[in-house]
Image (tube, rainbow, N blue to C red):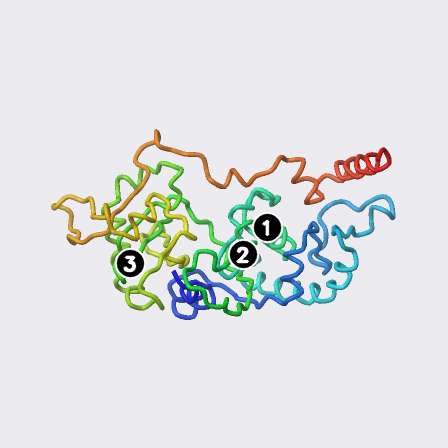
Amino acid sequence: MKKEHVLHRQFSAWYPLFGSLTIKSIILPLPQNEKDYLLHDGTLVVSGREDPPTHSQPNSDDEAEEIQWSDDENMATLMAPELREFTTKVQEAINSLGSSAFPKFNWSAPRDAYWIAMNSSLKCKTLRDIFLLFKSSDFITRDFIQPFIHCIDDSPDPCIEYELVLRKWCELIPGAEFQCFVKENKLIGISQRDYTQYYDDISKQKEEICRCIQDFFKKHTQYKFLDEDFVFDIYRDSRRKVWLIDFNPFGEVTDSLLFTWEESISGRNLKGDFSEGDALEQDSPAFRCTNSEVTVQPSPSLSYRLPKDFVDLSTGENAHKLKDFLKLKRNQQDDD
């Protein structure tokens, strides 16, 4: 995998070509100050005023003050005007998408950080929701600091224009999502996306699902993408219509799910496993799904979770815990 291949998977690189096949989205350039803010070690601060708070009014003036959560107060103050302007742009974009959006970065979405959101979801209504997820996500951090980690060429890293992508929020059924592997413009493998769960419908309809995905690939993406090796995600809705969700690099930076990258790159063990009676071509892709509840596995995202007390502290959900924590830290400093 080369650096140019990674650049071709940026959302802004492929969305203009395939926008009619996917979910409506809006791309906003990410100003440098917002990038610095997301990479800063301090906890979440969004200075721009957003929606009116839904909680009851505080009783004291101290509680009424908006707390700036940051290790560097000067940095938070310096960034406030830019954040306020960016907040307005983001809110207008979210409103135009139906008041809720799915956020992602140039390549990744903060799927590893959903646990920290108040709704345990990636459904965002404000910039505050988005930044909470982004600052908590290893996937987003990797996009920032190691976007070319698995590339084999040693040329200088290209300049990247970072972007916030807002996608119209849709309730997608995990059992209808599939990841497809393409090598030399040939569809070689299809994997159940949520491989940790068993879905009876997939096992019963895998021939039909495979046929639908093959038809979609030949009609819409084969020889139309910028490279001949790539991975793409699709969603098959209740009307059996196939939607394009995303493109990913063909390499280790992308989760291989029920395949291994060794077999995907070599092409071994990737023959279609359907009987001759099925109306599929002889060179049909390998289709893999979780075949029984015995093979159900815990979700990989569970490893990114933190204890609830840490979540309460990081989000300000429980002010009493925050006060107790600050008192404890002050007492420890006094003892030292």
Which residue is painted at 59% across and 50% down in the image? 133
Which amino acid lies under the numbered mark 3 shown in the image of this protein?
Lys
Residue 1 placement, left or right of 96: left
Between the residue at mark 1 and the residue at mark 3, the CA separation in whole angstroms equals 33 Å
Q: Decide: few, some or many residues near mark 2? Use Cα within 10 Å; few <14, some 14-19, many ≥20.
A: many
Which residue is painted at 55% across and 65% down in the image? 163
Q: Position of residue 13 (x, y in %)?
A: 44, 68
Under tag 1, what secondary structure? Answer: helix
Residue 50 placement, left or right of 140: right
Q: Earlier in the sequence, mark 1 or mark 3?
A: 1
Which amino acid lies under the numbered mark 2 shown in the image of this protein?
Pro
Q: Earlier in the sequence, mark 3 or mark 2?
A: 2
Residue under pointer 3 = 183
The answer to whether the residues at label 2 and label 1 have Cβ atoms under 8 Å apart is yes
The tag on residue 333 is none
Between the residue at mark 2 and the residue at mark 1, the CA separation in whole angstroms equals 9 Å
Which residue is painted at 53% across and 59% down in the image? 105
Which quadrant of the figure contains the C terminus? top right
Using the image, determine if residue 120 lies above or below residue 92: above
Q: Quadrant of residue 59?
A: top right
Q: Position of residue 324 (x, y in %)?
A: 79, 35
Residue under pointer 2 = 103
Q: Which is nearer the eye, 311 or 73?
A: 73
Q: Which is nearer the eye, 67 or 123?
A: 67
Residue under pointer 1 = 133
In this view, which residue lies farthest toward the left?
A: 276
The answer to whether the residues at label 1 and label 3 have Cβ atoms under 8 Å apart is no
Which residue is painted at 12% across and 46% down in the image? 276
Q: Position of residue 75 (x, y in %)?
A: 75, 60
Q: Quadrant of residue 269?
A: top left
Under tag 2, what secondary structure? Answer: strand
Which quadrant of the figure contains the N terminus? bottom left
